[in-house]
Amino acid sequence: MIITSIETFSTDNVALVRLRTNDGDEGWGQVSPYNADITSQVVHRQVARHVLGLDASDIEAVTATVLDREHKFQGTYLYRALCGIDTALWDIRGKRAGKSVCHLLGGKTPSFPVYASSMQREITPEAEADRMLALKEQFGYQSFKFRIARECGHDEDQWPGRTEKIVKIMRKTLGDDVILLVDANSGYTPAKAIEVGRLLTDYGISHFEEPCPYWELDWTRQVTDALDIDVTGGEQDNNMNVWKHMINTHAVDIVQPDICYMGGITRTLQVAAMARQADIPCTLHSANLSLVTLFSIHLMSAIENAGKYVEFSIEGLDYYPWQYHIFSPDYKIRDGRVNLADTPGWGIEINPEWIALSDYHISDTGSRF
């Protein structure tokens, strides 16, 4: 089962990968969203040349080969590109076995609770609370995440007083029976994060995401040590040495790798396994409704140390138009859960209409590099 071609179908924010073998297998994957057209170029320039001709059944060896051959250029774009190959190979593995990826990983039907995740800071606290309440009533969400601080804010708020106001309004509007989470997106120094964390604790917020610049792990650990609330992080990280340090020092209470930023399922499983050995839960980062959320539900439904929920973007066509109409069947929320088809591989079909609007490139065994 030799890899014979790698195709990319890309737009600015989403790029899919179709991988084929000499046995007639076909698998679909996705590179990391955002600047996905650039990442597609990396697929063909730095990844395909090492992958073509390899055994598609040995996904771990494919991953290791790419990272070894590109050891001088390991950075975020390489991992983002590798994800497209890795996830397409897992699709093939599932199809050949007649099982969903979730089932291959030891899970059952891919189904998991989700939390409604807001991507907006420009929205007023009142408007944010109102739309969350409407989602609760319509889809049965019981968990909600909203944004505080200014992104990389250096202890500044999006506008003065917004964080304190939105924390209070969200709890008052949604009631005491829901789970509330916040994301500070690297907003604070340790002292300010601890101050804000005490406010969050007073209002029963249970999840404080990325309180400090994510590259300042020692700062984050100070916050974790000072607060009872769960401090979480890791979405940006892909270096295994960083993950080892984060987990071994218990810099966070919950790890949040992103499958697409990590380079795929294979490397994300390694992080989840390290966290399990340290008795740390894993709650994946999946901040849009492209295939990353699909991948995350399959993996979270199978790992032993899965957290309570999967992140699920609530942004509509007016805010994230590019995350829709990529594949079918689409996500459906009922009683705060996403249930996926338990069919081979990823269990989806790529929409031809989306493909028709994308830019196409191919590398195959006849390509010259």
Image: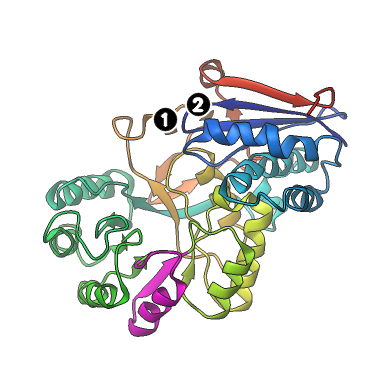
> Label for residue 11?
2
Q: Position of residue 341 (x, y in %)?
A: 58, 40
Q: Position of residue 345 (x, y in %)?
A: 68, 40
Q: Residues within 10 Å of mark 1 (few under 14, many from 20)?
A: some
Q: Mark 1 highlights which residue? A: 322
Q: Which mark is residue 123?
A: none
On whether residue 56 falls in the magenta region, the answer is no
Residue 161 or 95: which is nearer the viewer?
161
Left or right of residue 74: residue 15:
left
Q: In which quarter of the image is the C terminus?
A: top right
The span shown in magenta is: 211-233
* Quadrant of residue 318 within the rendered picture: top left
The quadrant of the picture occupied by the N terminus is top right
Asked whether the residues under the numbered discs 2 and 1 touch, taking CB atoms below 8 Å apart as contact, a structural biologist would say yes
* Res. 141 visible in picture: yes
Residue at horizontal 80%, vertical 24%? 367
Let me know if residue 28 appears in the view. no
Mark 1 is on which residue type?
A: Trp
* Precedes in sequence: disc 2 or disc 1: 2
Task: Identify whether 274 is placed above or below 147.
Answer: below
**Residue 164, quarter of picture:** bottom left
Q: Is mark 1 on a helix, strand or loop?
A: helix
Q: Where is residue 217 in the image (x, y as percent from the top left)?
A: 46, 72
